[in-house]
Image (tube, helix red, strand yellow):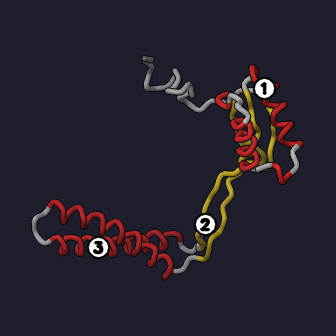
Amino acid sequence: MMVSSPFGGGRAPGGLPRLPTPPTGWPIGSYATYGEAQKAVDFLADSEFAVGDVTIVGVDLMLVERVIGKLSWGRVLGTGAVSGAWFGLFAGLLLGLFVNQGFALQVLTGLVLGVLSGLMFAAIGYSMSRGRRDFSSASQLVAGRYDVLCQPRSAEQGRELLAKLALKPPSANP
């Protein structure tokens, strides 16, 4: 058993660091997409390589925001009503379970109050933006490239295996 400070230090179960730390190891491959790096590590695992020594590192990180669509009052209020309805339904179900008076009435009350509060909060939030952000989007963190690192004790073997993967014809690569 290991005793450590709640403010860091030590290692978590499985030997992983508790706090964010820079990756260690030697580069054994570099790939344009995460899927390619994952495929390389999968190939190493299939080749009985000690993949516990391997790390995939995203390099040149970018935050990509993909615009999904234009916002309008109708869309904002509709989304707020649906979101509030789910919360209200959940709250109504909980009330219905613990209050002995009219299960259906409790659920319906929670649903109505949820829809109304969802509408209100959505309207307040959208009106406060004053047209500065009239679109919805989804953000994603992506890397310019993905390096596969390996601990020095087995890096050369890993490089050799990945060279064999690169020499396979595309149809032979699963």
54 or 166: nearer the viewer: 166
Q: Is residue 108 left or right of residue 81?
A: left
Can the viewer see residue 151? yes
**Label 1, residues with CA under 10 Å away: few <14, some 14-19, many ≥20:** some
Sequence-wise, the earlier of marks 2 and 1 is 2
How far, Cα to Cα, is label 2 from label 1? 41 Å
**Residue type, mark 2 in image:** Ser
Sequence-wise, the earlier of marks 3 and 2 is 3
Residue drawn at 56 percent across, 24 percent down: 15
Q: Which residue is mark 1?
A: 155
Quadrant hosting residue 98: bottom left
Residue 171 x, y percent position in the rendering:
83, 54
Residue 33 x, y percent position in the rendering:
76, 50
Q: Which residue is mark 3?
A: 111
How far, Cα to Cα, is label 3 from label 2? 28 Å
Q: Is residue 119 above or below residue 153?
A: below
Quadrant hosting residue 31: top right
116 or 172: nearer the viewer: 172
Number of numbered tags placed on the structure image: 3
Q: Which residue is mark 2?
A: 137
**Label 2, residues with CA under 10 Å away: few <14, some 14-19, many ≥20:** few
Sequence-wise, the earlier of marks 1 and 3 is 3
How far, Cα to Cα, is label 1 from label 3? 59 Å
Q: Regarding mark 2 in the picture, which secondary structure is present there?
A: strand
